[in-house]
Image (spheres, helix red, strand yellow):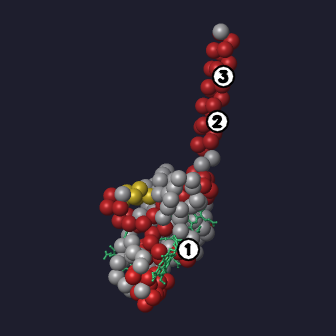
Amino acid sequence: MRRAIYVSGILLLISFLLVIADDFHQDWKRLQARFTGIAENRFHSTSDAGLNFNPGIAQINVPGLSHIDRCTTCHLGIDDPKYRNAEPPFQTHPGTLLETHKSKDFGCTACHLGQGFAVSFGKAAHRKLEYWNETMLPRPLIQASCGTCHRSEEVPEADILTQGRLLIKEKGCNGCHDIS
Ligand code: HEC
Ligand code: HEC
Ligand code: HEC
Ligand code: HEC
């Protein structure tokens, strides 16, 4: 009996250490460590006001959309033009969409889909997951989500969506299908 208690105690300790070790190797921790060393940040320290970075999990709460997005835990330069030429995933967002849709108000999954809560790169945030219907859209399809908010026929900066809506109208698809 005593031996069984010793053995289970040791097993418990080992699993506890494994959990701690696993936590140290999380994707986002590795990426944040890399971020401080990239060329754009070389002359700053983490406590420096010039470096707009708080280590740890970042989270954007968008109550209006019931979204909580943690994408900026890894996409650390997304709002800052200084990172225009930084390596992925630290680069500034392309185009001007984050100026008209401030990330603090819209988050990321409103346009990209994907799992907002996730802080692991390989599986959860980007890739297809079982029981998760909103897999992140590949780049050419992102415009599909603009239409959930922009209801007018022509959507600025979404030429593919606009073309699709015109085509649906021209071909009369709505005569039989309820496509919106
Ligand atoms: C754990 C870190 C991490 C998180 C969390 C994360 N990303 Fe990424 N993301 C990356 C990395 C690393 C790359 C670069 C991948 C490459 O170069 O192959 C990337 C690339 C991308 C790209 C461009 C390449 C592509 O696959 O289309 C998009 C878009 C993107 N992420 C959106 C998101 C969104 C939206 C979220 C939140 C739902 C998110 N990411 C959460 C690490 C992350
Ligand atoms: C208003 C819609 C919208 C929002 C909000 C948005 N994105 Fe995007 N994002 C896009 C579109 C559209 C593209 C593709 C642009 C293109 O093809 O030029 C894109 C492209 C990207 C890319 C690809 C960049 C590359 O170089 O391949 C990344 C990474 C990315 N977005 C991350 C994010 C993250 C992280 C957030 C949240 C902070 C976010 N986006 C919020 C619409 C959005
Ligand atoms: C969650 C809802 C939502 C989504 C998704 C969304 N938008 Fe918007 N968009 C808005 C709102 C709201 C405004 C007005 C912002 C303001 O005036 O402060 C806006 C403003 C804009 C503007 C600037 C104002 C204008 O009408 O010229 C453009 C351009 C735009 N959106 C394009 C897009 C594109 C392209 C996408 C998809 C990649 C997209 N939006 C996805 C809600 C959304
Ligand atoms: C005259 C009525 C009618 C019109 C107009 C019409 N459809 Fe359909 N469509 C149908 C019917 C009926 C089906 C189902 C066929 C089946 O299941 O065998 C269908 C099936 C489809 C499907 C496959 C759906 C699925 O679940 O597999 C798509 C996609 C589709 N239509 C798109 C379009 C588009 C785009 C247009 C306009 C260019 C259009 N349809 C115009 C009647 C119509």
Residue at the spot 36% in from the left edge and 73% down from the top edge: 149
Q: Nearer the viewer, residue 145 or 21?
A: 145
Label at residue 18: 2
Task: Read off the residue under disc 3.
Answer: 10
Residue 90 sits in quarter: bottom right
Q: Name the residue under label 1.
A: 139
Q: Which image quarter holds the N terminus?
A: top right
Q: Is 152 situated left or right of 139 in this image? A: left
Give the image location of residue 24, x and y in percent. Answer: 60, 44
> Mark 3: few, some, or many residues within 10 Å (few <14, many ≥20)?
few
Taking the view exactly as shown, the residue that stands out farthest to the front is: 176
The image shows residue 164, relative to residue 50, as above or below, that is: below
Q: Quadrant of residue 10?
A: top right
Q: Residue 3: where, in percent of width, then height?
A: 68, 12
Of tags 3 and 1, which is closer to the observer?
A: 1
First-in-chain label (1 vs 2): 2
**Mark 1 touches mark 2? (CB < 8 Å):** no
Q: Which of marks 3 and 1 is nearer the N terminus?
A: 3
